Image (tube, rainbow, N blue to C red):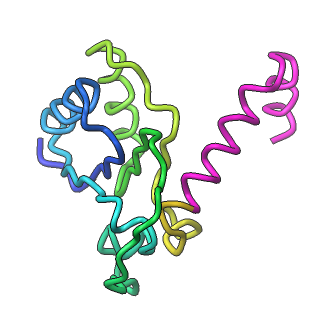
Amino acid sequence: MKQNGAVYFYNLNSERGRQIRMLCLTLGLKIRVVDRAQYTEAIGAIAGVPGYSLSGETYKGEGFEDEMLILKGFTGGMLDSFLHGFRKMKIQPVALKAVLTEANCGWNSLELHDELVKEHESMHSQTPSEVTDNKETE
């Protein structure tokens, strides 16, 4: 069941991180841990996307403590299997997660983190009727 997908881990040196690693291994997904020193590198470079290269710059700031996942090379079925695995294995969800896209390949980890935090806060500050209204207009 070898897959081509990869999962990039941020701040998941915990029991939940271990469970997610086991899920990834079960699904044949590659696992990559992103070190804080790489936070200013383009995500596309970290993920080995053609056209992006590592600058070699070492980030020395505080970064962020939030857990975050980036999913690369996932098909719809792979994403469904990954999310189903969380439920099946009773793994608490990681609030900040993104699929690597052309739009976010040039962002660094700090920029992606900030955007995901904004999106997460926006989604959770809406009432259920606002969420339904937004889905109907999309």
Residue at coordinates 87% horizontally, 38% vertically from top-left?
137
Provide residue 56's location: percent of width, then percent of height.
Answer: 31, 84
Residue at coordinates 21% horizontally, 26% vertically from top-left?
19
Provide residue 12's location: percent of width, then percent of height.
Answer: 30, 38
Provide residue 135's location: percent of width, then percent of height.
Answer: 78, 32
User: Seen in the image, is 91 located left or right of residue 62?
Assistant: left
Res 57 quadrant in image: bottom left
Residue 113 lies in the magenta-colored region: yes
> Which SS type dominates the magenta stretch?
helix
Q: Is residue 71 above or below residue 40?
A: above
Tell which of 76 and 55 is nearer to you: 55
Residue at coordinates 41% horizontally, 72% vertically from top-left?
44
Res 46 quadrant in image: bottom left
Residue 123 lies in the magenta-colored region: yes
Res 15 quadrant in image: top left
| Quadrant location of the N terminus in the rendered image | top left
User: Seen in the image, is 53 located left or right of residue 132?
Assistant: left
Provide residue 49's location: percent of width, then percent of height.
Answer: 35, 75
Q: Which residues are magenta?
A: 111-138
Residue at coordinates 31% horizontally, 47% vertically from top-left?
9
Q: Is residue 69 above or below residue 131?
A: below
User: Seen in the image, is 52 located left or right of residue 96?
Assistant: left
Tell which of 49 and 18 is nearer to you: 18
| Quadrant location of the C terminus in the rendered image | top right
User: Seen in the image, is 25 located left or right of residue 5?
Assistant: left
